[in-house]
Image (cartoon, rainbow, N blue to C red):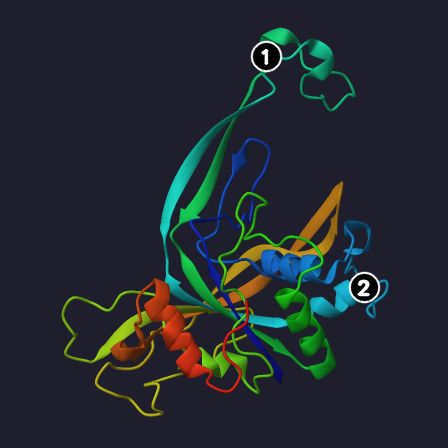
Amino acid sequence: MTGFLLHLAAPLQSWGEHSAFTHRDTAAHPTRSGLIGLVASALGIPRAQAVADGTDPDTLFARLTQVRFTVRVDRPGTVMSDFHTVGGGYPQHLTVPTAKGGRRGADAATIVSHRYYLSDAAFTVAADFTDGGLARRCADAVAAPRWPLHLGRRSCPPGALLLLGTDLEDPAAELNRIPLARRPPLTTPPSGTVDVRFISDQPLPARTHPAGSVGPGGPSTPVVETVLNDEPVRLTARDRVHRARSAHSTTRPLPVDLCKGYGTAYLDAIANHFPAQGASS
């Protein structure tokens, strides 16, 4: 395996998993569909070609669905709701279209929509590839994207630091060592560790202490398997289809010294972690 790491942090993120009509939810972490979509946007894959229904497994988008992602929750953020109204105040020929091809009447022109976001969240994501050439191509595209990137919605651009280490032999294992984008606790826990949540689209191996044996912080929590409807089948403009897939999550103790805070302190820690290549943005 080979691949790279992404740092997903911004004032707002939104990773819809079962959004419909006027209720736009967000998952508690980046979805698989959202991550594949981010890389596809960087590569410049048109929506008309965003198909992975098995008809042609050799297309670039279909190959992206073979990438394996592991998400580390550096900061879970806070869920916030944004109240929207759409379509009010326009003449009828400009109001919201109906399913029958007409327009909503003036007395029902305004649509109320609730949209949810994660505020001040930060995630470090490992992207694992079996194809080294594809991994390098995707990393180069994220560093210089063809189209603007966003964290779930177009109104949520990523922060300046997006692409971390590249050409990593085991990106998922690197998540146990790379600095955490969170403040250290006010008092150091007796265990010397902090609990960090991991989510993967592949079964997570049983882990104990990051050093390789059960340390003072104790072992990881049991791996929990859930089902998410975020495996992309088609992401075309008017035909977006997903299928269900398994997600595996656990909480691991990581050394408290990995907590490097925000801002320049975190940037310095990342630069020191990759002294040979630094971090790319």
Q: Residue at 38%, 74% (x, y): give it.
A: 268
Q: Residues within 10 Å of mark 1 (few under 14, many from 20)?
A: few
Q: Nearer the viewer, mark 2 or mark 1?
A: 1
In the image, residue 111 above or below residue 71: above
Q: Residue at 70%, 10% (x, y): give it.
A: 92
User: Which residue is the site of mark 2?
Assistant: 54
Secondary structure, mark 2, is loop
Viewer-proximal residue, 168 or 281?
A: 281
Residue 227 in view = yes
Image-quadrant location for residue 49: bottom right
Image-quadrant location for residue 104: top right
Q: As shown in the figure, which amino acid type bears the numbered disc 1?
A: Gly
User: Which residue is the site of mark 1?
Assistant: 89
Secondary structure, mark 1, is loop
Lower position in the chain sequence, tag 2 or tag 1: 2
* Disc 2 + disc 1, Cβ < 8 Å: no
Toward the top, the furthest residue is 107
Toward the right, the furthest residue is 55
| Residue 69 picture location, percent across and down | 56, 70
Q: Residue at 65%, 63% (x, y): give it.
A: 39
Instruction: Give the spatial CA distance, label 2 vs label 1.
Output: 45 Å
Q: Quadrant of the C terminus?
A: bottom right
Q: Quadrant of the N terminus?
A: bottom right
